[in-house]
Image (tube, rainbow, N blue to C red):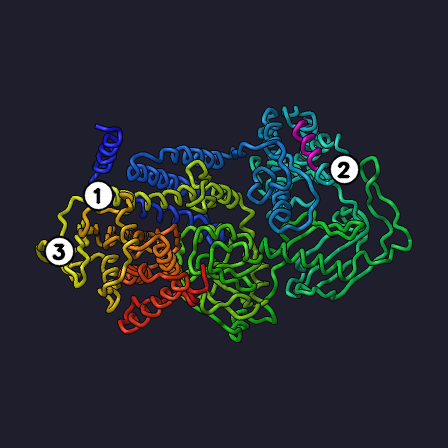
Amino acid sequence: MTIVKRLLSRLVRVRKKRPPYPFAVIFDTFRTILKQNNRILELIADMGEKLGGEYVFDRQYIISMCEAVGDEVYKLIYNLNLLGERRYHALYEAYERIRREIEEELAGRPIIAHTAYVLPLDLITRDSADEAGGKAANLGEIKNVLSLPTPEGFVITTKAFQEITESLEIDGIVQELRELFDRGEERKLLERTKRLKHLIMDAKIPKRLSGEIEKAVNEVTEKTGTTRPFFAVRSSAWLEDSQHSFAGILRSVLNVRKNAILDAYFDVLSSLYSYEALTYRFRKGIKEHESLIAVLCQVMIYPRCSGVLYTLDPLNPAQGVMRISASWGLGPSVVEGRGRADEFTVDRTAPYSVISMRIVKKESQLVAVDEGGVEWRDVPEEQQYEPCLHSPELSRLADMGMLIERYFKRPQDIEWALDRDGSLYILQARPLIISKPEKPNGCDLATLLLSAPVIMSGKGAIVHQGVAAGRVFVLEDLDKMDQVPHGSILVVRHTSPRLARLIRHIRGIIADYGSPTGHLATIAREFRIPMLVGTESATEVLKTGMEITLDTTQNAVFRGVINELCLQELTEETVFEESYEYRLLRRVLKKMSPLTLLDPQSSDFIPQRCRTYHDITRYVHEKAVDEIIRISETYPHEVGSRPRMLVLPIPLGLFVVDIGGGLHQSQPLPSKISPGDIACTPLSALLEGLLLPGIWSTEPVEVDFGSLMSSVTKTFSYNVAAPDQIGRNLVVISRDYMNLNLRLGYHFNIVDAYITENQNDNYIYFRFAGGVTDDVRKSRRARCIGHILDTFDFVTEVRGDLIVGRVKKLNRSQMYERMKILGALIGYTRQLDTQMDSDALIFHYADRFVETLHSLTKVKGGEHGCQAKNYNTGSGR
């Protein structure tokens, strides 16, 4: 036997290898995975809702929910390995890592990811809060996401702090101090805190820390071109600049020479254990394991003036104005109240007009000293009554402030500096604590809304309650997400997990289709994004550029900006956020809820990249669908049931295998059955479309001999050509599931679908390849099919004559429509390659199909009538 024959023989044996379990058992495992997927998302959603402040919960709730989610995720991994013949063992490692991190959080031993002692500010975002602390995380987001000017710098991470304090047994010392505080022994507490600060100052420096700081200083020096860099060294504790401000309590050291950064670093660390900081933490109920601190080191800005911006008046928010304070020199003269400052009142809407100003005599200013440090100096007399800021600078500052407020979705307390060249820098931003306003004019807000113009009301399902105002952006192509402006209300057809990358850039989400327990819904709750799904018509009613107010508390969309609603949202009280249980739940949810595996086509879509339980769930769901398709393609005849021939008025040659509930069983069925015997939802829909009048053409077509021979001599892969008997096609069905392998001459179709009442489970997979003509015509037909599928919300991929389309997570009626469309499409396009003489015909036949389908379904009527997107397929993809 030749080598080629032996290889072919081995290949045949591999193909004929039986699956490890009967197909019915395999399919039950698949359905179990779908149920577990939904259960996990529901549990995470329940935990996310608790963060909204409307529910009371305790630590035991958090523990029990963590156990419940962990158990379900483990079972999910186990079942995927059953389905995939144990090819997904790497998921167990990811699961164990995440489970251990959650257990450590619950035990008060937070795990800081394996990270460097020093990280450049260029790499810091809010996702880095554990390593970089609250202040640096906010500032990194402002710099790296909003692209607003901030001084260059780096962060000495909480990892360094952990190693420094590990050998000092800090926890026991702080517990003793807490007991002194509880007993009111203030003098002893003050003495002990002084000793503790000295203990920190004398602590051992971790190996490599000095070297990493020196390297970071050199990189910043090279980047800024500064020959003698000086730094501002400031605290960035875990809870700092969040719901706990620590304002003025933790130390900042300004104008530090590069060789003095380590001394300044320990000075800042020790301030975490000052009398003021400890008593603040005790009063706020902040645990010791929550008191990790990083230190932010930034190149000094030598400002002409600096100050503070409140994006909303904290004492009178109903006025809808901003407050800006400014003084000459460095910022502490304003924030510490040690110098007099000009006061400006500015409108919150562009062009940010100055409403009023109060210019005071400013006699002193804080300035940097040449050799390091700062000192107070007199302001030249001619400057003392001069305004620190003028209208153009106030307008620029206000514009930055509103961008930051819109991004963080809360009024902001912002520290800023204006250098001698007129450049503005953001130095710090934190949530602004404001007074709850009274109802406007003594009226109930509901009364005010009676006259508001309503665009949509009562449509769809609420994912997360809240209010968002802004301009609509209708996103039709997920590959154009970079075009979505900051601060938009995003309107989409479907809630794809890929949209998660926009979640911090937008104010609200409205979707035609989607589930309140889907992947994107989970992320929206995590980030408190007002979101509606299942509106069915938002992409038609709302147009890009429209200014709207989305109020998901009332399930309504209003035309224009309703300022009273926005003000109510901005001033919502969040006292519950100060509780330890709230903070603990938020931290463990960071190990569960975020979704980082966004694109199944990415090379990073692997078990090793799973960072959360949500990542694992998303990965398993995608792979489970892939596995059931692979199994049904690889073992098309190993289904354990007697095939029955389906008699149709068209020459389909289709044999049906029922694995449970796919056929009506009121009486023993013969070997030949009719469409009336079909109980399978996907197959019923497909046949309904396939048998529409005029869809199946029986007219002969002309084919040139060269094209015919090209097709005859091609070798098709096993996956495309199955089943291997020409003229005999196979469909495996249950009540909700269908896997169809259909060969029509030289055209090959695979349809795999699951349609139930639970829309999170629903999906359709479609693949089409082959043809009787040359490659150019076949590829044109594939592109034509791709345009048609795009029109009906499929995600498509075209490679030569192969077209793959996927759609999922629509409700049962909508999925029925798509299956009906596929049936019509199979009949309509089976000989279409013979007509594809030019590229222009791609759009011609795509448009004609949509028009034909509309006319036919309009005649048919019923709940499953088809509806395409409201745009021309000829516009391109």
Res. 366 image quadrant: top right
Q: In which quarter of the image is the C terminus?
A: bottom left
Residues under numbered marks 1 and 2 in contact, where contact means CB atoms less than 8 Å apart = no
Q: Residue at position x 54%, y 46% from top? A: 579
Name the foreground residue: 799 vs 590.
799
Dot 1 or dot 2, earlier in sequence: 1
Q: At which x and y percent is residue 178?
A: 60, 35
**Viewer-side label of 1, 2:** 1
Label 2 sits on residue: 230
Q: At which x and y percent is residue 518?
A: 40, 52
Q: Tell me the magenta residue range.
A: 210-221
- Left or right: 598 in relation to 756: right
Q: At which x and y percent is residue 471?
A: 56, 64
Name the foreground residue: 435 vs 381.
381
Tell me the crowding category of disc 3: few under 14, some 14 to 19, or many 20 or more residues within 10 angstroms, Cα based.
Answer: few
Tell me the SS state at disc 2: strand
Q: Which mark is residue 665?
A: 3
Q: Residue at position x 74%, y 66% from top? A: 355
